[in-house]
Amino acid sequence: MVDARDPASGYPVFSPCGFSIIALDLNRCPMRLQGENRVENVHAGIYIHIPFCVRKCPYCGFYSITDLGQTGAFVDALVQEIRLVRLPKATFDTIYIGGGTPSLIKHVQLRRIIDSVLDRFPFAQDIEVSIEVNPGTVSLDFFKAFLSIGINRINIGIQSFDDQQLQFLGRVHSAREAEEAIRMARAARVENLGFDLMYGLPDQSAKDWIEDLKEATGYEPEHISCYMLTYEEGTPFDEWRKAGRFGPVDEETLRDLFEVTVDFLSHAGYEQYETSNFARGTALRSRHNQKYWCHAPYIGLGPSAHSFFEPKRWWNFRSLSKYIQALQRGELAVEGSEELNRWQLILESVFLGLRTSEGIDMLEFERRYNVDFLGHFGAVVKRLQARGLLSVTSDRCALSMEGMIFADTVAAMFADHTGE
Ligand code: SF4
C-alpha cells in the first residue's frame, strides 16, 4: 500500500527523481544513525509485511496478492516465524506493519501478531507502532481497534485527492473515501496521522499538485510523505510507458514539482527531514523509517521482507505459498542472504546519509569506518559543491535542493570514488 519502499528490498524509496541506488546495485541499503544517535545507542526495528491487496495497482512493485482467503494461513505462518526467528543482540523500539494493505486483515489477527512480537522480542519502554492503511478498507471501529491494540501511528495511502488521478493510478478508493478515512481517524482520536501522496503523474501540472498539497495540509496531518511516481520494472505501468501509452514527465516539470513540494510544505509548517518525508516537528518524524536511512538494524517478517544487522542482510521468499510451506515445515522462510564488505557499507552510508536533510556527520563517519570523509571523497565533494549540488559545513555534508533533484548524478560520482 505505501509506495515508499523499493520493491526488491522493502526499503524506502526516497527519490524525487528515482535515485538509482538500484542502478548501483546498492538497493537494499539502510544507513546508520549519526551524531548523538550513534549506532551503538540505537534500538533495532521490526518490519512486518502483510501481503494482501484488494487489487494490484499497476505502478506497484511491492509483493502482494489479492487472494484474501489466505489471510488465516498467513497469520499462522507469521506467528510461527516470530517464534523461530533468531534473536539478535538488540533491544527494539519500533514495529512497522506495512504491505500490501495491512488494514485488510482482521484486528484480532493484528492483535495476535503484535502480542506475539511483544512477547518474543526485547523492547524498550517507548515503542512506536505504525500501520499503513488504505481508504475504503477502514472504519471508525477499525481505527479505535488499532489504538486499543497499541498502534500509535497510522499512515493513510491517499496518493491524491483527485478522482481522475486516482483512477489513472488504478487505486481502489475515491477521493471521498480518502476524506472519510481521515475524518474517521480523527474521530477515533488518532493523534499521529500520516498521509502518502504521489506526484509526477503524466499531465499533472504544478497547479494540480498544489491543490493536492492544499487539501492534504488542510487536514493538518502530523506527517506527509510525497513520492514521485517511478516506473518499476515488471509493472504494467513500466510496460505501458515503454509501449508509448504515456510519456515520462520531463526533467524541468519534475524539478518544478519537487521545488513546489518543499516550498509549499515548509510554509505549511512541515520540516523536510528526508527527500520525500515531511513532519510537523522532529518528534513526529517516522522513527522506524529513519532506521533505514541510518543503517540501524532491523528484522523483517513476512514474505519478501528484508532484515539487516550489519554487515549481514537476508530476505524472505517473495511468494506467500513458499513462505507458508517453509514455516509449516518448521523452517525459516529465508530465501537469501549476503554479507556487505566495508566499502559497500561505506557507500550505502553515503547515499542514504545524503538523502536526509541533515546529511552526513563526517566525524561520526570517520569514527565508524575509519575513513576521513573529505580526505577520501574531497575531490568529488568539491566538484559537487561547484555545481551547487552539495553543501559542506565544519561537520556535515548535505545535498542542496538541486542536489536532491539530481541525486542520481551525485550517487554515481560518489560511487566512482570507492575502493581501497
Ligand atoms: S494498495 Fe496498490 S500500491 Fe499499495 S501495496 Fe497494494 S498494489 Fe501496491
Image (cartoon, rainbow, N blue to C red):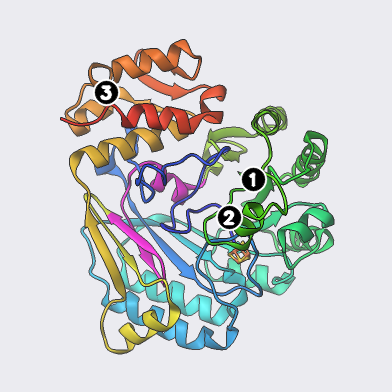
Amino acid residing under circle 2: Asp
Q: Position of residue 330 (x, y in %)?
A: 26, 86
Front-most of residues 311 and 231 = 231
Real-space CA distance between mark 2 and mark 3, rounded to the nearest whole angstrom: 33 Å
Q: Are marks 1 and 3 in contact (CB under 8 Å)?
A: no
Q: Position of residue 280 (x, y in %)?
A: 62, 38
Q: How many marks?
A: 3
Number of the front mark, 1 or 3: 3
Q: Is mark 2 within 8 Å of ligand 1?
A: yes
Q: Quadrant of the C terminus?
A: top left
User: Residue 55 falls in which quadrant of the image?
Assistant: bottom right
Decide: is 217 above or below 160: above
Q: Position of residue 10 (x, y in %)?
A: 44, 58
Real-space CA distance between mark 1 and mark 2, rounded to the nearest whole angstrom: 18 Å
Which label's residue is closer to the chain start, 1 or 2?
A: 2
Query: Could you say which disc has been placed on residue 363 in the image?
Result: 3
Provide the residue span drawn in magenta.
Answer: 286-308
Magenta stretch: includes residue 300: yes
Real-space CA distance between mark 1 and mark 3, rounded to the nearest whole angstrom: 32 Å
If the picture is divided into quarters, which one holds ligand 1? bottom right
Q: Is mark 1 within 8 Å of ligand 1?
A: no
Residue visible at 60% across and 78% down? Answer: 66
